[in-house]
Amino acid sequence: MENILEIVFRLFIYKLERIWREWTTFTIQPKNPVKASTLDDVEILYKSNNFLVVNKSHDIVINSNDPMVKESLQLQLKKLFPHLVNPSLQHDFYFVHRLDYATSGIMCIPLHKKACSAATEAFSGRKTKKYYLAILRGHVACEVMDMDKSVGEDCSERDGNHKMCTSTDPHCVRSRTAHTRMLVLQRGLYDAYPATKVLLRPITGRRHQIRVHCADIGHTIVGDYTYSNRKDVQPYRMFLHAFRLVLVNSVESLNVQTLDPFSSDIAANKWMPVETINNINDASFLKLDMEGDS
């Protein structure tokens, strides 16, 4: 009963805060996260002679063969670092891993062939640790969860979105083993509806793996148009972010982390935590470690 009263009280306060923000024009707000990406809109997290690590914006492709695409991470980097462009590469830079169009976060770009080989070996050999932040629909009950259903292509998909599904779906073809670990950070409300903030670690790297696994357990990512059956259209973005990358390799090992883009301090996120189970710290990362991790 006390938990219900606390949620009702926090919801009341949340509504008052939203009304206050709408009526006050002098409040200082963080940088507007809703604006579209531009060629200048890329955050540099780390740069050495071996690697460039950037924070990719949401709703932008990494690269494209379509000449009509005028905004991509490739074009952003080409404008910022024209001297780093490799003319022998089709897309100017060594892109050794991917993020979905709607997903923001860490991208690591090797700057020469030796670094590319080392990074490629680390990713393909599962010597990396990748951690994501997400806000999911509904309240996730378990603190720690392993999602290990195989992921394959959805053969019923016809609009070119490369939709995937778990192996238990009758339309699933060419499935491959997949494993995602999830840790609950906070339970609360997204725009007055129950939601959960989580830290995720994909052990394997299948297409849309995190999105598919979250949808499979009944907790789709907020703003995931594809895996909400095209119903979740109100949020300004999909709430999935590549938050931390640990890349152990023979050239230069990296451990890079961004700020939390889903903070409740950013009004546009419409996120109000009610209960904190875990903070974002080393203890939380350890809870997602696997036996045999270095």
Image (tube, rainbow, N blue to C red):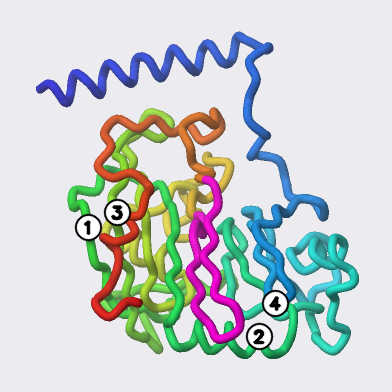
Quarter of the figure that contains the N terminus: top left
Say left or right for 250 vs 93.
Answer: left
The residue closer to the viewer here, 80 or 136, is 80
Element class at badge 1: strand
Q: Position of residue 94 (x, y in %)?
A: 71, 80
Q: Residue at x 49, y 60 (%)?
A: 244
Real-space Cα distance between discs 1 and 2? 34 Å
Quarter of the figure with residue 111: bottom right
Q: Residues within 10 Å of mark 1 (few under 14, many from 20)?
A: some
Say left or right for 5 vs 16.
Answer: left
- Residue 255 painted magenta: yes
Real-space Cα distance between discs 1 and 3? 13 Å
Q: Which residue is mark 2?
A: 116
Q: Residues within 10 Å of mark 4 (few under 14, many from 20)?
A: some
Residues rendered magenta in the picture: 241-259
- Mark 4: which amino acid? Asn
Mark 2 or 4, which is nearer the eye? 4
Q: Which residue is mark 3?
A: 283
Q: Position of residue 194 (x, y in %)?
A: 31, 36
Q: Residue at x 37, y 65 (%)?
A: 201
Q: Which residue is mark 4?
A: 50
Real-space Cα distance between discs 2 and 3? 31 Å
Residue 222: mark:
none
Residue 144: mark:
1
- Mark 3: which amino acid? Ala
- Up-down: is 290 above or below 225? below
Q: Residues within 10 Å of mark 3 (few under 14, many from 20)?
A: few
Quarter of the figure with residue 51: bottom right
Q: Position of residue 153 (x, y in %)?
A: 44, 80
Mark 2 or 3, which is nearer the eye? 3
Element class at badge 4: loop
For marks 1 and 4 on the same chain, the one whose residue lies earlier in the sequence? 4
